[in-house]
Each structure stands twice: as C-alpha cells, then as structure tokens.
Image: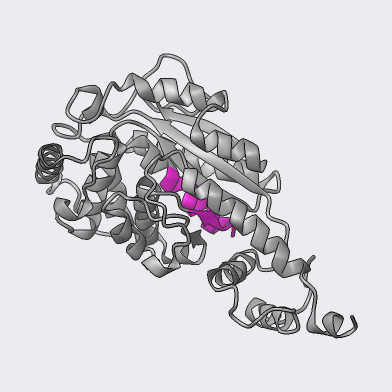
Amino acid sequence: MKDNSVLPIEEQLNRFLQPKCLIPGGLGLWEVYFRKICTAWGEISGDIRPQHIIFSADNGCNMEGYVGYNYEVTQKQSRNMLLGRSSATQFCNFNNIPYEVVDVGIASDDGIGVDCKVAKGTKNILNHPAMTEDEFNRAFQAGYERVEHYVAKGINLFSFGEMGLGNTTTSACVLSALTGADPTETVGPGSWPNKPDLMKRKIDFVRSVLDTHKDRIVAESEPQRVRRIVAHVGGFDIAAILGAMLACVEFKKPFVIDGFITSVAAACAVHINDCVKDYALPSHNSREKGTELALAEVGITQDMVPIQAQMSMGEGTGAILMVQMLKTTQYMFVNVGTFADLMKL
C-alpha cells in the first residue's frame, strides 16, 4: 500500500505503527529494518521484490598458487550455481528469490552466467596492480548496470554474493589499506584450515602486498583513493559489488550485505558516499575476522547483525536468509491488525 501523505516518511511510519496490535519495540531489529526499508523507498509497503546477484571472478594471487586452492574451482562452482546446486542457490530456490551469476572475471574462455567478463582473472597483487584503471571501471560499471537493469523491472531490494578463490585475501588487503588496520586484524582463514602456520603465511602475504602498493594508492580525494585501493589490491568481484551498492543508493533501493567480501565492498562504498549507511542492511556475522571491522565502517555494530551462525560459505548464503526474514517481517508490519480491531472481538 502506498501512503500519499505529504508528511515526512518518519512521521508517516510513526502514525502507521502506533495503532498496530504490537508491543512498542517488541520486535526489536525487525522494526528498525522495516523503518529503514520504508525510509529508503520513501513509502510504506509490505511488498518486497528481491533480486540476488552473485559476482564471480578469479584472483591472480590464487591462480599463481600463492593462496588457496585450484583456481578452476571458481568456474566449476559458478556453473554449479547456474544449475541451482550450490547452497546459496538452493536457499534462493526454496524461498522463491530470483538470482543470477555475473561473470566479471572468471579465468575461462567463455562467459559463465551473465557475461560481463573484464579479464580472465586479475594479476597477482604481490607483484602487480590487480587491474588497470580501465578494468576497474568496467567491473564497477558491470555491477552498477546489473542493479539499474533490475530497478527498471521493479526490483526494490537487492542482496549480493560472490564467488572467487582467494577473495578473502584480496578483501583483507583492501580493508587494511582502507582503514590502516594491521593484517592481523583483517586476515581470517577463508577456505583454508584454521591453522597457525597457514594463517601466518596469509598474514605475511597481505603485509607484503600492502608494502608493495603503499605508495600507489594515495590520492587527492577519498573516492579516488578507494578506487585505487580496489584496483591495486582488490578483485573484480569487489569492484563490481562496489558499483552495485552505489547504484542502489542512486536508485533508492536498500540492499543486504552478506559476509566478509561484501562487507568490505560496503566499507569502500561508504568512503565514497556516506549515504550508503542509509541503504545497507546486515545479514550475518561471518566467522572471518575482519567482518566486524568492515561493518563498523558502515556504522553497523554487532548487536545490529541478526544472524550469528559462524558462516563463511560466500555466495550470499547469509544475505538470502536475511532477505527471507525481511520479506516475512515486512509483510507482517503492514498487514497486522490494530488494537481497535482487537477490541471489537
């Protein structure tokens, strides 16, 4: 239902909720996020029309064997997602949430899913910038245009996931470069076993990368600095998610953050446009160590994160679960009865 009142949306929400048969504040975060979603839209509605987008890309550090496993896993899992056989896509199928896989840099000759391939993976960030400025712009634009495409089709809530071996490493590099945090605060096990020797190897890798690129990522403006950080030490998936999130702000559509990689993209987006905070919704607290730090950059504290399940699957698994809960609570807030109705019984 659309509220045509000329009152500010905050006042519309107060008047709308006041007579409802609800204990004030009794639904905690769900009322907070109901208000946030309606405020982002500029109207009160119980109709969430979601779209989940998974950005898939390979990373040069992984392809050269410095981190992670066989890089071909990225293309195989991306094809698996297209068939609906991954955890994230099973969540989507069960909950009737449409999804797509967007190839922004898988190391394959053919495009997998929606073909926005910039290159067959980034370069190894230990020795080279991950991508050129032009490649960054193309990946960023791919993310922006996928959101623009779905906004034109009536989608009003987005969620983002990713697929790409090595992307917890690139995300740790980006987050440390963005915030100045030591790699011990941003590096987690990713898909590796959580063993001290492997963690030390990964921390040392990130520290070496940051040292290599420290003089290349300075810039006169913060937006330009963020772009240089992602282009030098990030991945095509991060660049695309960054573009998608900023598109959500432009088109006034809220979006759901998934885990570590998307949290880092959101932190980057906030450094470009502070209004990102008004549209970003958390889903789960990934077991990746840097997630809490990345979310804090977006103004999200741990008591604002609904799902505490120690997940680290990627693909947007946590975000999809959050979308389903948001759909449920959004519908309830709009359609629940009033105290006046109750007293007539």
Residue 61 visible in the current orientation:
yes
* Nearer to the camera, 290 or 235: 290
| 75 left or right, relative to 145 | left
Q: Is residue 151 above or below residue 87?
A: below
Expressed as whole percent of the image width and height from the top left, the position of residue 132 reads 29, 34
| 159 left or right, relative to 153 | left
Q: Is residue 242 magenta?
A: yes
* Nearer to the camera, 338 or 297: 338
Q: Is residue 336 above or below residue 102?
A: below
Q: Is residue 172 magenta?
A: no
Residue at 59% x, 37% y is 99
* Nearer to the camera, 133 or 97: 97
Residue at 9% x, 45% y is 211
Farthest-out residue, front: 345
Expressed as whole percent of the image width and height from the top left, the position of residue 89 reads 55, 34
Quadrant where the N terminus is found in the figure: bottom right
Q: Which residues are magenta?
A: 241-256
Main SS of residues in magenta? helix
* Nearer to the camera, 296 or 42: 296
Residue at 33% x, 65% y is 296
Q: Is residue 160 above or below residue 79?
A: below
Residue at 48% x, 48% y is 318
Q: Is residue 200 above or below residue 118?
A: below
| 238 left or right, relative to 202 | right
| 174 left or right, relative to 199 | right
Quadrant where the C terminus is found in the figure: bottom right
